[in-house]
Image (spheres, helix red, strand yellow):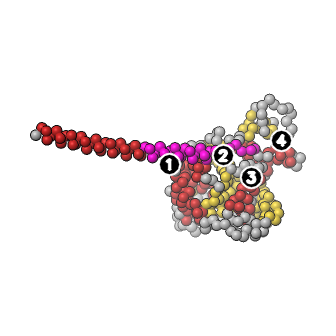
Amino acid sequence: MNGINGKGNDTKKSKKKTALIILTCIIGAVLLALLVFFVTLLVMRERGKASFGGSPAPNLNDFIESAGDENDNNKGENNPQKPDFEYDIYYDGSYYKYKSNIITLLFMGVDREKPFVKNELYGNGGQSDVIILAVIDRDNKKISFISVSRDVMTDIETYDIYGNHISTVKKQLTLQFAYGDGYTESCRMTAEAVSNLFFGVTIDGYCAMSMGAIAPLNDSVGGVEVTLKSDFTDISPNMKKGATVLLLGDVAYKYLRTRPEETNAERLERQKNYLSAFSVKLREKIKSNIMFVATVYSSVKNYVLTNFSLSELLYIASETVNMDMSDEIYTLDGEYVTEGEHAEFYADKWAMFRLILSLYYDKVG
């Protein structure tokens, strides 16, 4: 009997040992897979980081010199004496040094609902109704947004339907996208026009989104809550002025596009408020799962044009997720002029100058 009991115990021990070995192997395999995943993620992040080197400074000195004799507000008087430290700008009695460790991204919302396709003929690719610059200050761990009016008057490159350059004219910024192929050329041309508008600021990457992406993008973060400053009962009966509602699906799309007796400036303000609320929820999702970026991109990729690689997207997401995001979304000061059906916005160049100085430069000395 003792011999039989001994063999039974040995068998049980053997089974437990085998189970332990199998469990150890499973755990080891999972840990190895996680290790490979995080190493891959780290490698991709570093590749993304390498894509964003130090960018050259914008041409603010050129602006001071060219505008100095024409504008009474110019305070960029000649530097009385050269200091013993490095600086890039002397303005209003202070010295400023350019912060080269900055990434500037351009986001465009294009007035089309279908996925992007490259047009054989130029001129019918839609207009960029929403134009936003994201300024990522990696040294100070801060993100700032500049919302640019679609109607701002600036130099636009015009092309014929075959893509041949015609001339440079002063028109609304939104039209630059339309003069292209509705695809990557339209994005490139708009990025160049925005860079020129902002004194040559380097645009490190762009992302254009057709309006068809709004609903899936909105719903990917569980919807966005907003307080209504106008009446939107034409969209939904519960969307009365003053109500706080959770936007879901096509309601979010209609809310951002509709303009109920508002000026474009008022609609721009509404879109700014939505963007702030959406950004908060997006950051929460990314903080809990960095790969959420890939999930979001996969859900809207047919409605998005970008020159970012996945590694660059992962780097930007990991770099910005814990950054301080300014509650204020900057807009350009200036004056609206309406002629016929078309609005024209003339930006205050000195106000733009001071905005760029505050975001891209540090005061030194």
Residue 124 lies left or right of residue 165; in this view the side is left
* Lower sequence index among marks 4 and 1: 4
Mark 3 secondary-structure assignment: helix
User: Dot 2, crowdedness within 10 Å: few (<14), some or many (≥20)?
Assistant: some
Residues under labels 4 and 3: Cα distance?
Answer: 22 Å
- The residue depicted at 74 percent of the width and 44 percent of the height is 56
The residue most toward the top is 84
Residues under labels 4 and 1: Cα distance?
Answer: 47 Å
The numbered disc on residue 321 is none
* Lower sequence index among marks 1 and 3: 3
Q: In which quarter of the image is residue 117?
A: bottom right
Of 215 and 27, which appears nearest the observer?
A: 27
Q: Which mark's residue is nearer the viewer, 4 or 3?
A: 3
Label 4 with label 1: CB-CB less than 8 Å: no
The numbered disc on residue 52 is 2
Of 287 and 327, which appears nearest the observer?
A: 287
Residue topped by disc 3: 195
Residues under labels 2 and 1: Cα distance?
Answer: 23 Å
Q: Which amino acid does label 2 sit on?
A: Phe
The numbered disc on residue 289 is 1
Q: Which amino acid does label 4 sit on?
A: Gly
Q: Which mark's residue is nearer the viewer, 4 or 2?
A: 2
Residue topped by disc 4: 76
Q: What stretch is highlighted in magenta?
A: 31-57
Tell me how many marks there are.
Answer: 4
Q: Which amino acid does label 3 sit on?
A: Ser
User: Dot 4, crowdedness within 10 Å: few (<14), some or many (≥20)?
Assistant: some
Label 1 with label 3: CB-CB less than 8 Å: no
